Amino acid sequence: MTRFTPRFMKVGILTAALQELTPRAQRDADPDRAIEDWLSYARELGADYIQLSAALHPSESDVPPEAMLDPVANTLDLRQAFDRVRAHRVLQAMKQTGVGLSDLGYFDNLLHHEAKARQKKHEFLMRVFDAATLLGVNAVCGFVGRNQQHSMDENLIDFEQQFIPLLKAAKERGLTYRVEQCPMPGWTTGDNWHNNIAYTPGAWIALHKICEKHGVGDQFRIHYDPSHAILMGQDSRSIFQYLKDEGYAFLIGGFHVKGQVIDSKGVSAWGSGGQTIGRGDWVDGKPSNRPADQVNAWKKQVVLADHELPGTARHDPLAYLQNRSVDWLDHQLAARELLPLDVANTHLVVEHEYPAARIQDREKLKPILQGSLAFVKHIDEAAACMYALQHEVLAGQGIPVQGIGREAYRS
């Protein structure tokens, strides 16, 4: 007889949820103070893990914060190399708070068309890799990016020439690079929608085949975020089923739990390609050089949808069936049913980008994040219990499961 033994995933939060938890003057003078503060804050929130956000310092970045839809956070400050002394300090803070690290995150365009800018980003990623090694985590999460001057097919060549060496460096350090599949439509004032070439399962498989050819297939994995699937008219169950059908279900190695709520009025106005004219990022027929104008490039996305902090969107069964919002319970069930996960060692990382709740105030944001984290934990526990009961206990006794459930490729 099969016992009832549900297996739960590990729940954490990306530290970009609050960019300025530690005042800039303090963190610039004491680079690791921000990590200590975030570990303490995570404990207050009820998070068991943090995904530690790394980014080029604002004084070094090629993209001003004013031009970003969701400014990144350099919680991990790598203006100076992260050494064993710094690592010891962070590891002690982790021990004291009881909060662990899921992985490190660095989200940038690693196929940038300008060689000097690309080299700077690659060198920074090497620092992130070294920090991950010293902190004892086995993965770094980020983007691939896109060369804006090349076609998508040409970018496959760019990937082979420029990205494979990064994966070889990850392999030397025993690390995996997990790609978040955001298409990044507003990353440029140009008309390209797909500015991160690893945006969809078909592309993941094509890229993985290149990786396999160079002996780094095990280093290339996906950090799946259902919000981006919703933006592109997809749903988690169908994506997972497609990967399984193609023999690539192993690619998904972690999750960002961030939702997306489609604005049907925006779709009616502009269609799935987003706003194409009159956005405000072009002035007098040319791309504006003002960051405050450039942020309007994101109207390709924001006229169509808003990011959801898990638990903040209304329960909407019709929206789930029409792929206009994330069905969180089915997302967690589908992951267990279709992916070969080591569930107990799989991380769910809450990524907060819900515009109306982007509060840069520690105390006001706390109950919002506490509620979202609690929602994620409980929805995962519910999915775990359903899976264990239906697929293990009932199946072990030959008892059928009732009903039909959501089916892949059908909405």
Image: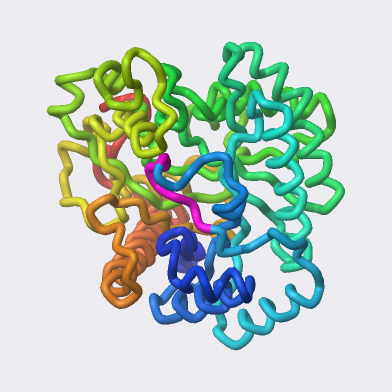
Colour logic: rainbow
Observer-nearest of 403 and 344? 344
The answer, for residue 7, to whether it is visible in the render is: no
- Residue at (48, 65) in percent of width and height: 12
Q: Which residue lies furthest to the bottom in this view?
A: 96
Left or right: where 256 falls relative to 403: right
Q: Where is residue 263 in the image (x, y as percent from the top left)?
A: 18, 34
Q: Position of residue 139 (x, y in %)?
A: 68, 53
Magenta span of residues: 67-73
The answer, for residue 377, to whether it is visible in the render is: yes
- Residue at (26, 73) in percent of width and height: 364
Observer-nearest of 128 and 277? 277
Left or right: where 19 falls relative to 299: right
Q: Is the magenta stretch mostly helix, strand or loop?
A: loop
On screen, residue 13 above or below 253: below
- Residue at (39, 76) in percent of width and height: 45
Observer-nearest of 158 and 33? 33
Q: Where is residue 28 in the image (x, y as percent from the top left)?
A: 59, 69
Q: Position of residue 234 (x, y in %)?
A: 36, 29
- Residue at (28, 26) in percent of width and height: 280
Observer-nearest of 289 and 5? 289
**Residue 355 among magenta residues:** no
Image quadrant assignment for residue 232: top left
On screen, residue 95 above or below 333: below
Image quadrant assignment for residue 104: bottom right
